[in-house]
Image (cartoon, coloured by chain):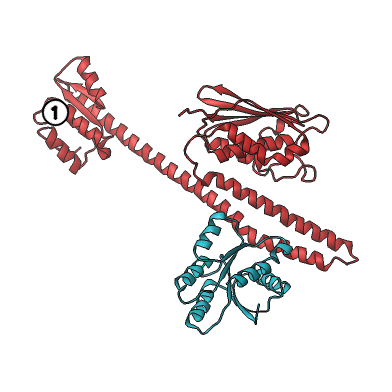
Chain colours: A cyan, B red
């Protein structure tokens, strides 16, 4: 991975922000993390990516966000796919096969179910590495 | 009482459809459209189908009266009749139709209320179990992180307390997952078609492979019906929960044996899953089907107490019954009935 990766994390739960940060650190991912605390905030930042004022290499998207859901954010990203090809990893608490398929259909590169074991949560970093390497 | 007159059946029908009355009093013999034809039209039209109709006729005799009532008339008056008799019958039928309408409306309202309450409850249980998982996950994870931080501590209580906390969170996670599974039995529509119970049983046994190997249980099964009008996944789940329990509550002093048998009872099949395990005292025979009801401590037998609640919900969804016959130390036989409904 060359240079510093700018990651947009849309997540309102501070505990999960901490865990995401830890898992990135654990996998030696040099990054700048921009945190959007709600869906509107995330969409605003994504508009910035689309207009070229913000450079983001990866979006980590929680689905259960205040104001606008992660699904809406993902839809907005997809609508702008011609302008931006930034990869998205959906991170969610739910364990639904239909949701997983739906998110991938909507253009997410990967789906990460937030586990309730710390070690498993740390594997998010590995997934981030894989997705970034692929794109 | 307000009376509108029509010269024949056709005219009457037009007037009825335009401005529905509370009751129709109709002669049988009329030009253009007679009383029977009018009655037929009234009954065929949903908004007027339950409108009380009294036929009037000069045709005496039991025969024509039967004919009229058979065609759907509420009453039949033979000419000549007295004004008092006519009035008495009209007011009796008005009263009856009013009562009928009121009770139908009340029934419809009660049904709608019941459906709504049921949906609300299900939705509530679903979102509660779903949304509670997220904060719970954080309690579990940060409990684990604290355990790591205090691994070297001298104070043993810190680790003991953290252990209780992490275990509690993990147990609650299982409970919520089970609750979610329970609510989903009601919400997912059943796949139409028929299920081969032998295949459902085989799938259940495959899912239980590890438990069967561990217990060394012998499992025997009758030839089961091949066309049960129930969802195959639900039947698999039902067998799995009942046989799983039979293996779990086996008697350590004798080799476990489980028998699956079936018997035709009228329009239903009566299944039994019978074991030679530790049994259940009669006073608990109802309780074991309750949601999250358990008879043993978690340390002795794991589980949340969801298995039989799910089994009961599945059986009840198909209008069947489930019960247990057992005594302490004498094994248990779980019976359930399912509709036969051959294709």
> In the figure, B140 relative to B209: above or below?
below
Q: Position of residue B207 (x, y in %)?
A: 66, 41
Instruction: Indicate the quadrant where residue B274 lies.
Output: top right
- SS for tag 1? loop
Can the viewer see residue B66?
yes
> In the figure, A22 relative to B65: above or below?
below
Q: Position of residue A23 (x, y in %)?
A: 70, 70
Q: Which residue is mark 1?
A: B34
Can the viewer see residue B289?
no
- Taking the image as shown, residue B327 lies to the left or right of residue B237, namely right
Instruction: Indicate the quadrant where residue B200 lies.
Output: top right
Quadrant (top left, top right, bottom left, bottom right) of the N terminus of chain B: top left
- Taking the image as shown, residue B160 lies to the left or right of residue B77, namely right
> In the figure, B317 relative to A106: above or below?
above
Q: Nearer the viewer, residue B25 or A64?
A: A64
Q: Please identify the residue farthest to the right as the structure is shown.
A: B154
- Taking the image as shown, residue A91 lies to the left or right of residue A73, namely right
Q: Chain of mark 1?
A: B
- Taking the image as shown, residue B29 lies to the left or right of residue B106, namely left
Q: Nearer the viewer, residue A101 or B262?
A: A101
Quadrant (top left, top right, bottom left, bottom right) of the C terminus of chain B: top left
Residue depicted at 21% across the width and 39% down the height? B21
Q: Position of residue B190 (x, y in %)?
A: 50, 41
Q: Residues within 10 Å of mark 1 (few under 14, many from 20)?
A: some
Q: Please identify the residue farthest to the bottom as the structure is shown.
A: A53
Residue depicted at 76% across the width and 58% down the height? B166
Residue depicted at 64% across the width and 51% down the height? B177
Q: Nearer the viewer, residue B258 or B209?
A: B209
Residue depicted at 56% across the width and 69% down the height? A88
Q: Position of residue B243 (x, y in %)?
A: 68, 35
């Amino acid at each position: 991975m060359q240079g510093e990766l700018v990651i947009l994390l849309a997540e309102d739960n501070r505990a999960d922000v901490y865990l995401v940060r830890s898992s990135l650190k654990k996998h030696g991912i040099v990054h700048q993390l921009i945190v959007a605390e709600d869906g509107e905030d995330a969409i605003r930042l994504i508009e910035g990516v689309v207009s070229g004022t913000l450079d983001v290499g990866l979006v980590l998207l929680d689905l259960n966000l205040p104001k606008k859901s992660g699904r809406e954010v993902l839809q907005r990203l997809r609508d702008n796919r011609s302008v931006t090809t930034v990869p998205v990893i959906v991170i969610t608490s739910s364990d639904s096969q239909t949701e997983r398929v739906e998110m991938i259909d909507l253009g997410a590169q990967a789906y990460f179910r937030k586990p309730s074991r710390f070690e498993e949560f740390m594997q998010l970093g590995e997934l981030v590495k894989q997705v970034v390497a692929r794109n | 009482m307000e009376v509108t007159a029509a010269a024949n059946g056709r005219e009457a029908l037009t007037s009825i459809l335009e401005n529905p009355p509370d009751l129709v009093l109709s002669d049988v013999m009329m030009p253009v459209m007679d009383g029977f034809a009018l009655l037929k039209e009234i009954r065929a039209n949903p908004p007027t189908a339950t409108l009380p109709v009294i036929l009037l006729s000069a045709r005496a005799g039991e025969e024509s009266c039967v004919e009229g009532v058979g065609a759907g008339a509420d009453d039949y008056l033979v000419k000549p009749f007295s004004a008092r008799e006519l009035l008495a019958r009209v007011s009796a039928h008005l009263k009856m139709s009013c009562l009928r309408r009121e009770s139908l409306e009340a029934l419809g309202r009660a049904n709608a209320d019941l459906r709504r309450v049921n949906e609300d409850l299900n939705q509530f249980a679903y979102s509660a179990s779903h949304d509670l998982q997220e904060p719970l996950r954080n309690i579990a994870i940060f409990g684990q992180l604290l355990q790591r931080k205090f691994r070297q501590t001298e104070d043993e209580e810190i680790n003991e307390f953290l252990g209780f906390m992490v275990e509690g969170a993990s147990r609650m996670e299982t409970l919520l997952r089970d609750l979610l599974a329970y609510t989903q039995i009601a919400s997912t529509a059943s796949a139409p078609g028929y299920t081969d119970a032998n295949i459902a049983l085989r799938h259940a046994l495959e899912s239980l492979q590890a438990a069967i190997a561990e217990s060394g249980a012998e499992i025997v099964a009758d030839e089961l019906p091949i066309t049960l009008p129930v969802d195959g996944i639900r039947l698999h789940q039902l067998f799995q929960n009942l046989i799983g329990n039979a293996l779990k509550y086996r008697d350590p002093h004798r080799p476990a044996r489980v028998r699956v048998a079936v018997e035709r009872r009228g329009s239903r099949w009566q299944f039994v899953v019978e074991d030679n395990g530790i049994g259940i005292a009669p006073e608990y025979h109802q309780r074991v089907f309750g949601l999250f009801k358990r008879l043993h401590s978690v340390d002795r037998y794991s589980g949340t107490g969801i298995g039989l609640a799910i089994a009961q919900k599945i059986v009840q969804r198909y209008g069947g019954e489930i019960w247990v016959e057992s005594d302490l130390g004498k094994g248990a036989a779980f019976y359930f009935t399912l509709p036969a409904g051959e294709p």
